[in-house]
Amino acid sequence: MLLSSLFLLPAAVLAQTYTEHLHLSPLAQTSHLLAAFNFTSTTPLPAYESGHFTHFPRSLAQILQHTKTRELHLRFAWGRWDDEQWGPRPRMGRREGGTGVEIWAWLDQDHGGDVEERWSGLVNGLSGLFCASLNFIDSTRTTHPVLSFDPEGTHADGVTGQELLHGTLPHEVVCTENLTPFLKLLPCKGKAGISSLLDGHKVFDANWQTMSIDVRPICPAGGNGGGECVLEIQQTVDVVLDVERSMRARGDPIPRPRPIEELECDGGKGYGGGDTCYPKVKEGEMGWSLSRIFGTPVRGSCHLGDGHADADITLEVPLDRMVNVTNAQPLDAGNEQGIRSYRLPNHPPGQYTDLALPQQSVTQAVVQPQPPLYATRTITGSGQQHGGMHAHLRNPHPYAQTITYFESLPWFLRPYIHTLRVRNSETHENVKLEKMFYTPAKDRERGTHLELMFTVSAGGEVELSYDFEKAVLRYTEYPPDANRGFDVAPAVIRVLPNDNNTGDGGRQGSYIRTTSLLLPLPTPDFSMPYNVIILTSTVIALGFGSIFNLLTRRFVLAEEVPASKLALRVKAIVGVAQDVVGRLKGTKAVEMGGDAVGSGKGDGMGNGAG
């Protein structure tokens, strides 16, 4: 079935568009800066079907077409978001993934072939495209969520004929091998425009970072013929940078003490001396600029010459802050939230754009809003056989919130569902579960799927806990670093929209992901096989060698051994040596005697001395 029939496409074809956006927001009460990159391009679905690609990456499109994928969401994340200090997550967590790699997609069921087989083809294709280990997402790491995810795109038939599959790889380490293919999907390949700021040394030196790719169809008026349907791809990169560490020169990655003449010393200290320096406390916020934080300004622009490309930068600071902008057009003076927007003109490749905030005193402090929910999750218990899972959820708002709690557990972690407890932390009363979906695990075939829906009261705290059993793996199933432990994927918490938080989360709601966990399993002593091999080899060598010698060696008397020529020569040499030694001893005795000296001199052969 063609995508045009799936989405009821009209005959008209729209021009392809491309926009890029950078949002900068200093985090309150910290020296951290949130930099949120967004790159969005659209292509008409008829052009997508016919294989005509201008802004949409062909390499990704061919994988989606081959696997009949209607909507794709891929996440690469590393680090931990600090809700206490940094406030709510960027984009309300909808473009954030769990630690490592997370992927979910809607695949068409109407086409031939097994959905699981096409899902395997999708993760294997993306594995090669992004230089990641997505091919390790097999059936044991794949689940079918019911409550936690809704399609973001517009589908003519809704979710009918589609199947949602979700996979995680929490042990995957995100690095520049993943960033480089990510940039190659952009029209300017990271060479010009806002994407030129994405340097691997800066992105992966951040305290927290996430990269996401979202592909979805969009049809105006619900796809009923009210407009042309397009296929949209959004690529986002969100990083939290330490301003002071990021502005450190790349050639000096190790912090070293600076000379005392370069330090700003507080001369008002009466107990100071000429050889000491007490640092002067800086007033206000630390100054920074794009060129110093990212190591380069914005190089040129990524206007593609078709009139459908825009690039802008927004800065979220109070209106009393001084901002210096180079080669950018301000769109407005700033709104009541303190957001200032700047448009990047169509620069030639050699022209640069920079934005800087100088060191200045703070007269209006930035107050971060409360996140939708605070969540932590830990593993409890001790020993090698049993343990427990404990999650703590806290609602900081004065209104109740309905949430879904989703966990995808590995098969070797076997939860006891009869021990599941969802209680109020203050009253210790059980919280009513509105919905629950549970799929038990099968050893080496599939993991555990657990989804819960319940309501957290206004300002309330909820504790979720259950016990589990640890399985014993086969010898070949342990990784090389088995003593480190096994990674458990983060829990996905979705705060459903209501009358109080619809403006923040929209119809999709807000998402929160806990940190990943390390599960210690019974681990054998991997040195024992080596010891057994060495001991067995030694015993076999000694036994075989002794028996072989007894079977192959012939025993005879010493007198029966015929004398060889070499033995005769050795015997003659020994006799001559003994004769020489005897003569030397006789000469010495003659010299020590009185009368024997003269007689010794008369015998030329020395016989008299003997």
Image (tube, grey):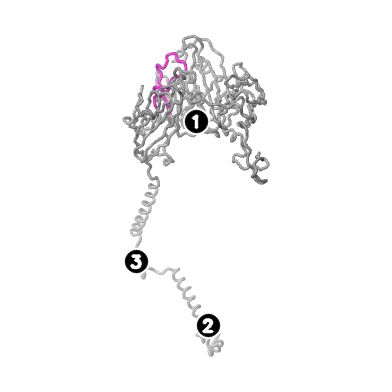
Q: Residue at x 34, y 64 (%)?
A: 555
Q: Nearer the viewer, residue 325 or 291?
A: 325
Badge 1 crowding class, 10 Å Cα cut-off, few under 14, some 14 to 19, many 20 or more, is few
Residue 596 percent location from the top left of the image: 53, 88
Q: Which residue is denoted by mark 1 in the rendering?
A: 84
Mark-to-mark CA distance, 1 and 2: 103 Å
Q: Which residue is mark 2?
A: 588
Which image quarter is the N terminus in?
Answer: top left
Q: Residue at x 67, y 26 (%)?
A: 350
Pointer 3: what residue?
A: 556
Mark 3 vs mark 2, foreground winner is: 2
Q: Nearer the viewer, mark 1 or mark 2?
A: 1
Report whether residue 139 is seen.
no
- Location of residue 246 (image quadrant): top right
- Look at discs 1 and 3 and give the one toward the viewer: 1
By secondary structure, the bulk of the magenta-drawn segment is best described as loop
Question: Over which residues does the magenta segment extend?
Answer: 142-167
Query: Around disc 3, counting alpha carbons within 10 Å, would you say few (fewer than 14), some (14 to 19), or many (20 or more)?
Result: few
Vertical comparison of 523 with 64: above or below: below
Residue 300: horizontal and vertical position, in percent? 64, 24
